[in-house]
Image (spheres, coloured by chain):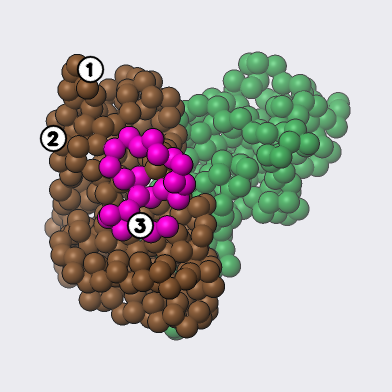
Amino acid sequence: MPVEDEIRRFAHSLAEDLDSLFADLEAAAALVLSRLGAENSHSLRWGPFAPDQLRMMEAEADGLLERHALVYGAGIIFDPDRIVSPEQLIPWRVRGATGAAEAYGFDFDEHSRDYYDFMQLPWFAEPKATGEPKMTAPYVDFLGVDEYILTAAVPFADDHGFVGVAGSDIEVSTLEQVMMREAKNVSGRFVLLGAQGRIVCSTTARFLPGELLEQNAGSGHHLELPTRVPTLSLYWE
Amino acid sequence: MTLTDDHSFGSDPSSAARSSSGGSQGLRQHIYRALPEIDRAEAIVTRLRDSMSLGLLREGDRLPSEVEMAESFGVSPTTVREALSALRSKGLVETRRGRSGGTFVVSLPASSVPMMRQRLEGLSVVQLRDMGDHRSAISAASIQLAATRAVDSDLHAIERLVEAFERADGTHTLARADSRIWLEIAVSAQSRRLLVAQLHLQLESSELLWAPLGSPRSKSSVLPYFGQMMEALHRRDREAAASAVAQRIQDDTFHMIDQKLTLALHEGSKDDNHAR
């Protein structure tokens, strides 16, 4: 099989995984909206959430972690201006040491040195502004989960406008493992790219994760992953 | 202060209370610092094993008590016992009873190819690149400071270590000789903090860099960089020194990632129906 076909086959298989992840995020966002939206429709600020409502959001996140081996953390992130209790801002779940899902606590005290201010970050600001799902380029999530990750986020809104996003983090290391497994079936070398041409991982040491492709590349071939939402692309020479 | 085999790591002559041959308590504490890893017993085994590989722990050295180690590693005594038991079964340490008892280092670890392979497989390309970036930052800063701060005796000490590296042979000796040079550069920078940072980086990277996997890192491809670094140090040329360091470490990183990718992509079976 020619290299290009092998790479296309890889692109399709990864695109399927990502599409199914976005479908699950959309389902989680829709569920939160339907379960919590009606009773909160009378006020601008949602909540405070009852224990069973928090458990419902946790269960959604846990299901996502269970179904998607790629995902490291998942949950709902509310807009701070649309919620009553700041400590309920991010019901977030991550894979624990044993592989089982566990709660992840963020720091919401504005005066703390470790205050996690996510309002300007692309996975929150862009879906908020556009109303569209978003897959970010790799970034170091300082004061978040402090890992090197990509984030996929799907916004949801009520009559007052944007409420929050259903989000999930993918560790670059995990994506790399998946790619390496698949790449055994591809005879050529190739590079997986995030937004703005940032290298996520590659099968050659010539292209290092985190660098920008344009500074290293000659004139090769580009292929966008055929996902419903723009996600990643592939480059090979 | 120098970092050759005959001298201690310590800069403080008043720290006379040594647990064993060479090495002040100060730096040695970092061997026993708290662990970030999840599998803590295994992490303790790796830390102690690497410390032996780097020559920070030597044959005959007595390790701190289980209680002391549990406290400094921030784990339970059970976890320390588990780690020591693993080291005992590898024949690296021995526990003796009685008044002069304790756990002693009895032999130095031989580089095990399967172990190195497993370690390389466990690290992602991103982590290897990041390790290289960190090494590059710490080492370039150290050599720039060394270029302005080193006196003749400092340069002489580094030179002797480079000569020792030239004579070195075998994975283990090369790894250790290479590490010693980087540590001595930090010493010449007169920076205890850079030395500690470099020590942690060497513990983490050096055995892996020189591991005999696939096509191992070659001594002869590394030597010219040391030549350039020494020349720049003698000229007190900060930029040239830093640039040689950056290139050397970039080569190291390329080498490690290449090894990693070769292992990841060529080990195991390819699809049978996949025609090449």
Which residue extends farthest right? A43
Quick check: is A220 in the magenta stretch?
no
Q: Nearer the viewer, residue A211 or B254?
A: B254
Front in this rendered view, residue B125 or A219: B125
Tag 2: amino acid: Gly
Q: Are marks 3 and 1 on the same chain?
A: yes
Mark 3: give few (<14), some (14-19) or many (20+) Cα within 10 Å. Answer: many
In the drawing, does residue B170 fall left or right of residue B245?
Answer: left
Q: Amino acid at mark 1?
A: Arg
Quick one: label 1 or label 2, which is nearer the N terminus?
2
The tint of chain B in the picture is: brown
Main secondary structure type of the part rendered in magenta: loop
Query: Residue at horizontal 19%, vertical 56%?
Result: B172
The segment highlighted magenta reads: B1-23
Measure the alpha-carbon separation of dots 3 and 1: 33 Å
Label 2: which residue?
Answer: B91
Say which quarter of the image contains residue A234. bottom left
